[in-house]
């Protein structure tokens, strides 16, 4: 049973160099509390990474004294 999570997939992110919209990230990497997106611009071949950081209240564990 595949459960749909609330992962936000950005689209049409403007290139950080030339400003052209990029339809979708080339690579997406999920890790605890953050998601990294690698964008590659087809117009100018510029590559950049965007990181989304979010709170993970449910995963936070109490520190052992
Ligand atoms: Zn570009």
Image (cartoon, rainbow, N blue to C red):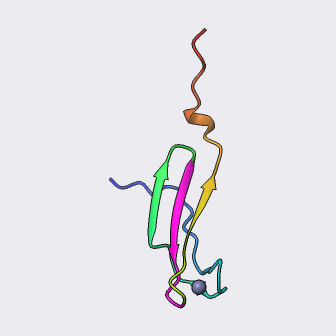
Q: Quadrant of ligand 1?
A: bottom right
Who's the residue at 36% across and 55% down the image? Answer: 2
Magenta segment, prevailing SS (helix, strand or loop): strand
Quarter in which the C terminus is drawn: top right
As rendered, which of 62 and 20 lies closer to the eye? 20
Residue that protrudes farthest toward the left in the picture: 1
Give the x, y percent position of residue 7.
53, 59
As rendered, which of 53 and 60 lies closer to the eye? 53
Who's the residue at 44% across and 67% down the image? Answer: 27
Q: What are the residue bounds of the magenta stretch?
A: 34-43
Question: Is residue 26 left or right of 23 when viewed as pictured?
Answer: left
As rendered, which of 42 and 55 lies closer to the eye? 42
Q: Quadrant of residue 55?
A: top right
Who's the residue at 65% across and 77% down the image? Answer: 16
Say if 41 sits above or below 58 in the image.
below
Question: Is residue 52 left or right of 39 when viewed as pictured?
Answer: right
Give the x, y percent position of residue 10.
58, 71
Who's the residue at 50% across and 73% down the image? Answer: 25
């Amino acid at each position: 049973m595949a459960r749909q999570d609330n992962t936000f997939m950005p689209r049409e992110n403007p290139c950080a160099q030339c400003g052209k919209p990029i339809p979708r990230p080339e690579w997406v990497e999920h890790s605890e509390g953050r998601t990294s997106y690698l964008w590659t611009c087809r117009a100018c071949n510029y590559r950049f990474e965007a990181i989304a950081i979010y709170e993970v209240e449910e995963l936070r564990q109490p520190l052992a004294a």
